[in-house]
């Protein structure tokens, strides 16, 4: 109840924050997959497939030559990353918290 709190330095605060982010990420991945590496692989594969599908779709439709300065692949990847971040965040926020499987 009555304790003196010791001030943490910036480096210590940063390490603590990174540790919390790491454990939250591991818990989230293991909630859907028993193996963390399989979960990370599936997430990366999903992103690569979406980028490939959109790249081919824009190439077939002829929209790749639109007035766009810069790399077209980077343009596609930023849109996909934002979409995946939005959908996964909203899905996890709206879903009820389930207890992790053991």
Image (tube, rainbow, N blue to C red):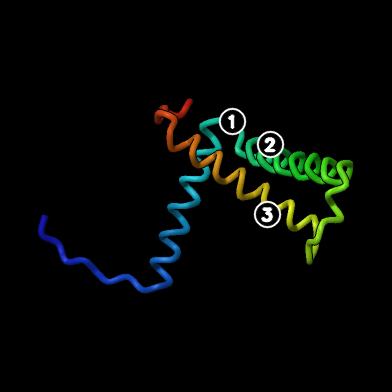
Total number of numbered labels?
A: 3
Select label 2 or label 3 by which is in front.
Answer: 3
Residue receiving disc 1: 33
The numbered mark, 2 or 3, whose residue comes first in the sequence reads 2
Identify the secondary structure beneath mark 3.
helix
Dot 3 alpha-carbon crowd within 10 angstroms: few under 14, some 14 to 19, many 20 or more:
few
Q: Nearer the viewer, mark 1 or mark 3?
A: 3
Left or right of 32, for residue 5: left
Above or below for 5 versus 47: below
Q: CA distance from mark 1 to mark 3?
A: 26 Å
- Which is nearer the eye, 64 or 102? 64
Q: Is residue 95 above or below residue 72?
A: above
Query: Horizontally, is 96 left or right of 67 in the view?
Result: left
The picture places residue 12, in percent across and down from the top left corner, at: 40, 68
Of pointers 1 and 3, the one earlier in the residue sequence? 1
Pointers 2 and 3 in contact (C-beta within 8 Å): no
Residue 1: image quadrant is bottom left
User: Disc 2 vs disc 1: Cβ atoms closer than 8 Å?
Assistant: yes
The first of marks 2 and 1 along the sequence is: 1
Q: Secondary structure at mark 1?
A: loop
Q: Which mark is residue 78?
A: 3
**Residue at mark 2 to residue at mark 3: CA–CA distance:** 19 Å
Work out how far the residue at label 2 is from the one at label 1, CA to CA, in angstroms.
10 Å
Reading the image, the residue beneath label 2 is 42
- The mark lying in front, picked from 2 and 1, is 2
Camera-side residue: 45 or 79? Answer: 79
Vertical placement of residue 65 versus 25, above or below: below
**Image spot of residue 90 (x, y percent):** 49, 39
Kindly identify the residue that appears in the image at 76 percent across and 45 percent down: 51
View extreme (front): residue:
67
The structure residue drawn at horizontal position 46% and vertical position 45%, both measured from the top left corner, is 24
């Amino acid at each position: 109840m009555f304790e003196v709190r010791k001030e943490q330095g910036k480096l210590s605060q940063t390490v603590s924050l990174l540790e919390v982010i790491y454990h939250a990420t591991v818990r989230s991945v293991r909630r859907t997959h028993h193996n963390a590496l399989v979960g990370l692989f599936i997430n990366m594969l999903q992103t690569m497939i979406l980028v490939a599908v959109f790249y081919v779709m824009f190439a077939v439709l002829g929209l790749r030559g639109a007035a766009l300065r810069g790399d077209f692949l980077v343009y596609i990847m930023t849109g996909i990353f934002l979409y995946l971040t939005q959908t996964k965040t909203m899905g996890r926020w709206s879903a009820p918290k389930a207890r992790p499987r053991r």
